[in-house]
Image: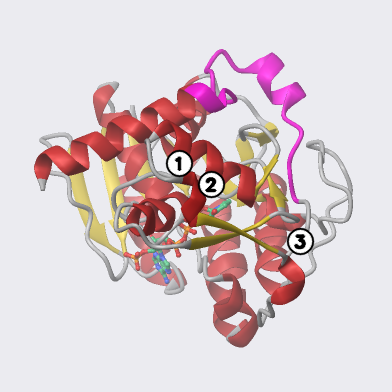
Amino acid sequence: MKFLITGASSQPGFKLVLESLRRGHEVLATYYSNTIPIEHENLTKVRMDITDLETTRKFIEDSKPEVIFHTAAYGDVDGCEENKEYAWRANYLATQNIAKIAGKIDAFLVYLSTDYVFDGTRGNYKEDDLARPINFYGLTKLLGEVSTLSATERSAVVRASAIYGLGPGRKNFAKLLIEKLSKNEVVSAFVDQYLSPSNSVLLAGALLEIAERELTGVFHVVGERMSRYEFALRIAEKLNFDKNLIKKASMDEFTWRAPRPRDSSLNCDRTRAILKTEFFSTELALEILKREYEETIRRS
Ligand SMILES: NC(=O)c1ccc[n+]([C@@H]2O[C@H](COP(=O)([O-])OP(=O)(O)OC[C@H]3O[C@@H](n4cnc5c(N)ncnc54)[C@H](OP(=O)(O)O)[C@@H]3O)[C@@H](O)[C@H]2O)c1
């Protein structure tokens, strides 16, 4: 199939490109200010600014993908709070534009969204639970979800949480942790912030299954619920780092520009019952992370 993947220079976008190529799909991958370090005969890389609505429309209509994976976003949570005007354009208006184009050219649309659409007061949120973002990033991503689902029936919203893995993209928690622990540096991790971390490779497999089977609606593709501190310990244990370097911290000791949900863990029972792809197992996810780490060491 012919895919368009926006945000292919991000961690989830990059892993999605790799898995799509491995499965034999033809991929048009877009980036903005960072590159996509893959060369492949079935891959075309294009620089695109999704906030340039007209150029984006023309490019997508001319290239006629069968599936659009829209993962590009302004993902900096504090940045969104500070620069609301840009966050509005990049996360809401650009998504609305892409969703309308998908409907017009009859492409199946998969929109990558976030656990931050929830307020984090209780956790374990199901796919159809009340979304009530407490920061501007979450609000703009929720508007992206609504735009997606209302513009075309051939669409899916996939929520992930604390996406992690090694390779391109901004620093994620696992990357940062491994970077510090491998240099024997101390890392602080919150004991009172709960998430359900999504491994980027497993997420890519689930996104592809959703597109290949044309599954519509809202999906939660996440791992087990755990605190950041537990997550750090599990990674350290798996990769044989010194667990004593991980220090307990509390969210109350920190102030961010944008408020953070305390427990944005997602319930994925319904999604697990629909998908054949295994995405939930922490053991499998950490095994993949370990292999990525060993590969990084082998190459250095
Ligand atoms: N980080 C998480 O834990 C998490 C959790 C749940 C969902 N998500 C979702 O996953 C996706 C990626 O998030 P991330 O945190 O990895 O974000 P990120 O590092 O900020 O990456 C965002 C991606 O969007 C691209 N992009 C940004 N502005 C653009 C523009 N104006 N035009 C075209 N492309 C643009 C970036 O390209 P360049 O890098 O080339 O500039 C990059 O590929 C987002 O949809 C986010 O909402 C993230």
> Which circle's residue, 2 or 3, is located before the other in the chain?
2
Q: Which residue is mark 2?
A: 232
Whether 274 is among the magenta residues is yes
Q: Which residue is mark 3?
A: 261
Identify the residue at image location x=81%, y=39%.
124
Q: Residues within 10 Å of mark 3 (few under 14, many from 20)?
A: many
Q: Which residue is mark 1?
A: 236
Q: Position of residue 160 (x, y in %)?
A: 60, 43
Determine contact: label 2, label 1, CB under 8 Å. yes
Determine contact: label 3, label 1, CB under 8 Å. no
Identify the residue at image location x=76%, y=61%.
261
Gap in angstroms between the C-alphas marked 2 and 3 = 19 Å
Looking at the rendered structure, the secondary structure element under dot 2 is helix
Q: Left or right: 94 with respect to 10?
A: right
Main SS type for the magenta part?
A: loop
Foreground disc of the pair 3, 1:
1
Q: Quadrant of the N terminus?
A: top left
Q: Position of residue 221 (x, y in %)?
A: 61, 34
Amino acid under disc 2: Ala
Q: Position of residue 185 (x, y in %)?
A: 38, 62
Q: Residues within 10 Å of mark 1 (few under 14, many from 20)?
A: many
Quadrant observed for ligand 1 in the rendered image: bottom left
Gap in angstroms between the C-alphas marked 2 and 1 = 6 Å
Amino acid under disc 3: Pro
The magenta stretch is: 264-283
Q: From the viewer's side, name the closer residue of 285 and 89.
A: 285
Looking at the rendered structure, the secondary structure element under dot 3 is loop
